[in-house]
Structures are given as C-alpha cells and as structure tokens.
Amino acid sequence: MFLRITLNLFAFAALTSFSSHAQTTITLISDNDAALGYHDYYNTEANNYGTAIQNAAYVMPGYSGGLNVNRALIKFDLSSIPAGASIESAYLNLYSLSPAHLHSGSNNSALIERVTTDWSESAVSWITQPPSPGQNGVILPASTSSSQDYLDIDVTTLVQEMHSIENYGFSLKLLNETVTNVLYFASSDYADANKHPKLVVTYSFRDHSNGMAELMQNNFTIYPNPTDGKITIVSANASFTDKDNIKLYNMLGELVFESKLEKETELDLSHLEAAFYLAVIELNGVLESHKICVK
C-alpha cells in the first residue's frame, strides 16, 4: 500500500536523455514541529503542544483508564532549494530522546506521510491536525533498541511532492495505534541541538550543453488550468512533425496519457483522477514542461 518510490517527477532524465548534471547537497534543521495528543477523560484534545521536547508516536494506557495517544508534525523550510531544481534524494534523520524517554513495545512501527494543509506550531492541536493524502507514506520499522536513532529515512518522493506542489511538512504516527507501543524522538525544542530533526536533500540542474534535447518553458499556453477535464494547448510555432506530442505523468512518474500535437490541440482529461500532473510537450526535439491540475 505504501510505496517508497525515488523517481523524481521533474527528473527529465527519466523521460529523455540528457548529458550530466551537477548536484548540491544541503542539510536542513526542522524549523517547526508540534506534538499532537489526547488523553481520555482529561479533555486535552484541544491543547497545543508546539513547545514539546518530543516528536513522538505512541499509544499508552491512560492514567484514569482509556488511552493516551500522541502523534507529531515536522516541517523543514525548503525555500533554499531553487524552484527549477530537481530533487535527487531526501533523507530524514530522527534522533532518540534517550535517556529522557525510550522506545518500547513489540509493534511500534510508524508511518511518515506528507501533510496537505497548513498548520501553526503555536496553535495546532489533536482536533485541528491537518490531513495527509495516504499515499507514498514511508514506514519506519519497529525499533530494535530502546534508544535507536532512525537515520537516512528515504523520504525522496514526499519531498519531491513538497517541492513541486506545496510544503506543509510531515506527519508521524504509529502504523497501528494500539497499546502499548511507543516511539520517542527529539523535537526542535529539545535542549541538545545535535538531536534536532535533520533533512538531507540533494538537488540538481540538468546540463544541456552537449546539444541534445533542451528543456524550455513558455513556448505553449495551456488553459484552463486548473481544469475540470478539457484543456486547450496553443503554440506560437506553426511547424509541427509527426513526432511532436504531449505526455502526462502522474505524481508517481507513470505515463497516464499521450497525444499528438497540433498548433491548437484540444484534449479531454476528464477520465483522469483529480490530481496534479506533469505535462511534457515535445516539439521539434525540444521539451517543455507544465504542471496541470485536474479538479
């Protein structure tokens, strides 16, 4: 159900051949995180825990019966990554809160997902927690020790989506929220800065200097966008060949639609699911990309 896919939606080397590319690697420290918790019979579900020292995923017995449940939100500022860059890889590092708190339980595997709406560290609570799309989630296996750090968690696909769509951060919760299972990680409010969540991202720009297919923008106009299904593609270039085409890829990098291209092309995409798609247009050996939203 949850796929760990490392295909970059905007990595056009997967769509055509380019020469080479220089890579840049940056390490980001979490700038926003918050605990989400509720405790049966204590009316805590509306409480804000934005300054909690832990990013935890747990289900424990409540002090007066019932359950004590915790999830977490973690966000990194991706604005230092240029808009036109391709995310090659992204690895998340979460550090144990040992000795303050320890992992426990025989079934404490967890799930990391991409959050799809905005939230405020100083206001979010259990009852206002943002949703996640439920796809491309990354599973953290059950801990092998009570003080285990989880390093190099492959979140490439999630970060690619954040970079290309919108960045609202990650959610962390137990895969099966059952008693008694606990994962405790340090938050950005923990005293030891070395244990704050880290995200290592590698990105690149493609090098087209060898004369192979180039990547261009703004040679075509696509409207309406967002669309209910039907779109029109208009080009100022009057010269077309049989090889000129448009291809649509979903967020997993899968080809979902293709068509021949004309000076004014009308397409019906109403059979596609409501989502963002990458349109790659080829005209006279030149590629141009557009992001299309089907409502």
Image: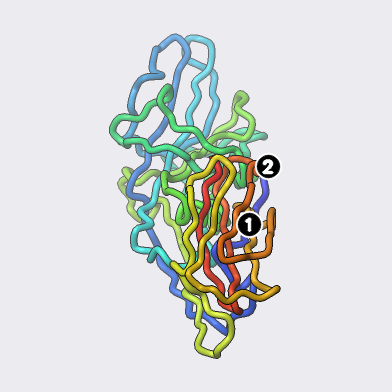
Tag on residue 271?
2
The residue sitting at the bottom extreme is: 210
Q: Which badge, 2 or 1, is on the more N-terminal residue?
A: 1
Which of the 4 image quadrants contains residue 29?
Answer: bottom left
**Label 2 close to label 1 by CB (< 8 Å):** no
Quadrant of the drawing holding the C terminus:
top right
Percent x, y of residue 104: 58, 35
User: Which residue is at 47% across, 75% downward?
Assistant: 205
Tag on residue 249?
1
Percent x, y of residue 259: 68, 60
Tag on residue 140?
none
Percent x, y of residue 37: 43, 25
In this rendering, is residue 22 above or below 235? below
Q: How is the image coloured?
A: rainbow
Which kind of residue does numbered mark 2 sit on? His
Q: Nearer the viewer, residue 121 or 159?
A: 159
**SS under mark 2:** loop
Which kind of residue does numbered mark 1 sit on? Tyr
**SS under mark 1:** strand
